[in-house]
Image: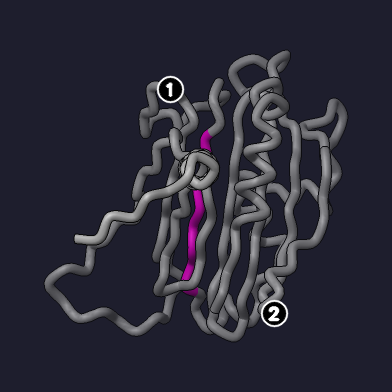
Amino acid sequence: MVLVRLGAAAVAALALVGTLAACGGNKYHFVDNSSEGNYFKVPSGWKVFPLTTQDTEGRAAKLPTETERIWHIGFDAAKQPDQAHLEADRPTDLVGDVQIYALSSSDNDQLSQSALRRIMFGGIDPVLQDPGTPAQWEVVSYGPVDSGTGVVGSRTVINVPSSEDPNKWVTLDGSELINPALGRAYLLLMRCESQCYLNERKSIDEIATSWKVKK
């Protein structure tokens, strides 16, 4: 065994590096689907729920003649996370989910970014449709998303009144991507009551910008 003696300065430097690595390494962790090349990061303290359902065990996979959801992951920022929070009308802590769809040939030919926004936002495209009077939603922001690999889409943030209490608002942050070459659609939706969204905006932006498709 070889013992290496370090000076005080070297020991201090190594201690600092270890502290920085621990802080940086523990702040976020990545969630990925390596076979689909899709990944994103969430704060380390948040609970991640695998939601994909498999009903094909014990038999050969059928030909992809219909559009199918092949991956579904949920996450919850609550101190006491619960999968039921993902279905709440106005979650008080941020919740979100990522979905990947394998598109049928016909859907792959016809599916638009507008159609994907309608899937995320409960049947409406808040970018192209009129919110009505009184407004059923407010568009906070909208912009294109480019993964740099030819997979393109958009990110839209909207405010909507709660169905349980119209005086309370929920903010939804949805991003969608399409890869026609592979016949894939990718959806990321995050939401919570509007003050919660403002409080968590830094983490939300970190998640949205980390969401990538590398395939």
Whether residues under marks 1 and 2 lie with C-beta atoms below 8 angstroms apart, the answer is no
> Is 200 in front, or is 192?
200
Determine the image quadrant of residue 140. top right
Which mark is first along the chain, 2 or 1?
Answer: 1
The image shows residue 26, relative to residue 149, as above or below, that is: above
Residue at point 54% right, 74% down? 184
Residue linked to disc 2: 150
Residue 125 at x, y = what percent? 74, 51
The magenta stretch is 95-102
Q: How many marks?
A: 2
Left or right, residue 35 beside residue 119: left
Quadrant in the picture for the C terminus: bottom right
**How far is mark 1 from mark 2, CA to CA?**
38 Å
Element at badge 1? loop
Residue 190 at x, y = what percent? 59, 41
Crowding around mark 1 (Cα neighbors within 10 Å: few <14, some 14 to 19, many 20+) is: few
Element at badge 2? loop
Residue at point 56% right, 81% down? 106
Secondary structure of the magenta portion, mostly?
strand
Residue linked to disc 1: 79
Amino acid tagged 1: Lys
The image shows residue 77, relative to residue 173, as above or below, that is: above
Amino acid tagged 2: Gly
Crowding around mark 2 (Cα neighbors within 10 Å: few <14, some 14 to 19, many 20+) is: some
Residue at point 66% right, 74% down? 151
Left or right, residue 77 beside residue 71: right
